[in-house]
Amino acid sequence: MLVSEQKPMEEILRSLDGEKRIFLVGCKGCAEGCESGGEQQVIEMKQKLEEEGKTITGFSLIDMVCNESLTRMKLASHRQATDSADSLLVLTCGIGVQSTAAVVDKVVHPGCNTISSGGAHAEWKEAERCLECGDCILDYTGGICPIARCPKNLFHGPCGGSEGGKCEIHPDLPCAWHLIIERLSKLGRLDKLEAVVPPKDWSVSLTGGPPRPR
Amino acid sequence: MKAGTNLEKVLESGRFAVTAEAGPPRGAVPSVILRKGELLKAFCDALNVTDNQTAIVRMSSLSSCVLLKQLGVDPVMQMVCRDRNRIAIQSDVLGAVALGIWNILCLTGDYQSFGDHPTAKSVFDLDSIQLIQVLSQMRDEKKFLSGEKISGEVPLFIGAVENPYADPFEYRVLRLAKKVKAGADFIQTQAVFDVSKFAKWMEMVTDRGLDKEVHVLAGVIPIRSVGMARHMRDNVPGVSVPDEVVTRMEDAKDAREEGLKICLEIIEQIKEIPGVHGIHIMAVAWEEIVPTIVERAGLLPRPLI
Ligand code: SF4
Ligand code: SF4
């Protein structure tokens, strides 16, 4: 079970700035249980965004968004609605955001912060991973997590050792930052990376912060 | 002037700067670093001291810089994010400034698995760009990262590195721009061997006008042996040595002389590239060649400002 909570509405709206047509993704697994991205929250989010003048091109509730093949299949049946959207807002843990990013060629925004594994991780052998850092930045990195996938936790990668798309530390691993840049250039959104990101608040992270009652 | 160090003065006066690297010893004997300082002092405007480079434990950069400073050398303290969190970093910066170490070069740091303590827990609380941000905030706003006030001035001349050869090539200049935006005053690049690729990169740098905002010093490495050429080509992440260079080394009768020649040819070409404000010589374990390089490259005498 991955425990997540919704990001504050202001942050979500900031990340959707300039985008009019949004497709929503919710999860009937952990996010439903945490009331951060289940059916009710997706419907509420739809209303809130419509009040802000956004058009919701559609939404999909998937049993386990972390299951990439299932998500691919489910989203394929919403092809028209996702194609006509400017971006997708995903109300799940960081893994769900990343598996959505892996199956659609659209900008994907995290709507939640992953704050704890709350027990056991689901069996997860795919590349997308989440280290429960408590302040999801997948919005900036195009839906690929540098905290979990770059050994140096870089917020401004790739480091000088990235070569041919491989991580300097392990030749069998792709360089996370190479993937981020590849994806953002494919989406024509390399401008996202012009930002200088201030040092991270690790106090909300599962590893690094003080112990917390969850 | 931001800190008024010798390096800053040379660069601000528009002269072509020369810096070199002095690796600290794997022990507590000060004479090792002092010898390097004496040897290089008259040939460089500043000397970089590495910070546990390739994650191998050595004498701290800060103490080695203090030793060099006592000789009248202008030291550049390298600082990596691998081993310190934001608390230790800011504290070390205050200590360094108090001791007259005013050039600080910000790096992320080589991953610990490359070094002699691969089982260490890494820190990486900040990355190199965030480190630059923290230092420029300390200097310009006299504030810690937390926003609390720092008592007194924190004069700093802030450096960073960039690798024009790392992938993706087109993105490297954008990353340099971010370092400049974060507050970098000078840049030392990874070693240049493929000059035309470096020139292409510099063209992108000048196209963006970045050479007006930051001083770029091109890195050079004199190659000492065929083995070193091969090792750098095949095993050192981030360094790219073209096959021609390795072949030239293999065919040479006197490998050292050939390595020196290659290095001098590269410097000759670098001097002509618009926007380059100096060179940074990384003669790893071959510091004694630096005076010859600087002399034969026609870069003597070094200015006294
Ligand atoms: S940024 Fe990465 S580690 Fe943090 S919540 Fe998002 S996916 Fe998880
Ligand atoms: S090569 Fe890429 S993934 Fe590996 S440490 Fe460098 S930036 Fe991170």
Image: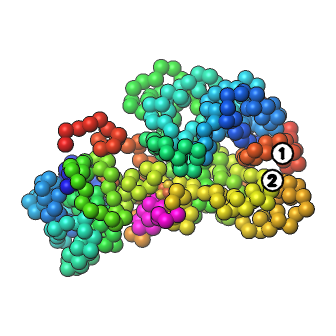
Q: Residue at x 61, y 42 (%)?
A: B56
Identify the mark at residue B289; answer none if there is no mark: 1
In front of the other: B161 or B15? B161
* Magenta residues (range): A171-184
In front of the other: A96 or B128? A96
Q: Residue at x 32, y 55 (%)?
A: A130
User: Distance of mark 1 from mark 2, alpha carbons?
Assistant: 10 Å
Q: Position of residue B110 (x, y in %)?
A: 56, 48
Query: Can you say whether A46 is above or below B45 in the image?
Result: below
> Horizontal placement of A141 versus B204: left or right?
left
In the rendered image, the quadrant that contains the N terminus of chain B is top right
For the question of whether residue B198 can be seen, the reply is no
> Horizontal placement of A42 versus B4: left or right?
left
Q: Which residue is mark 2?
A: B224
Identify the mark at residue B65; answer none if there is no mark: none
Tell me how the rendering is colored.
rainbow
- Residue most toward the right? B253
In front of the other: B174 or B233? B233
Which secondary structure lies at badge 1?
helix
Count the labels in the image: 2
Q: Residue at x 59, y 22 (%)?
A: B98
Identified by mark 2, the residue type is Arg
Which secondary structure lies at badge 2?
loop
> Horizontal placement of B59 versus A164: left or right?
right
Q: Position of residue A179 (x, y in %)?
A: 44, 65
> Horizontal placement of A29 versus A95: left or right?
left
**Chain letter of the residue beneath label 2 in the structure image:** B
Query: Which one is closest to the eye, mark 1 or mark 2?
Result: 2
Q: Residue at x 37, y 61 (%)?
A: A144
Q: Earlier in the sequence, mark 1 or mark 2?
A: 2
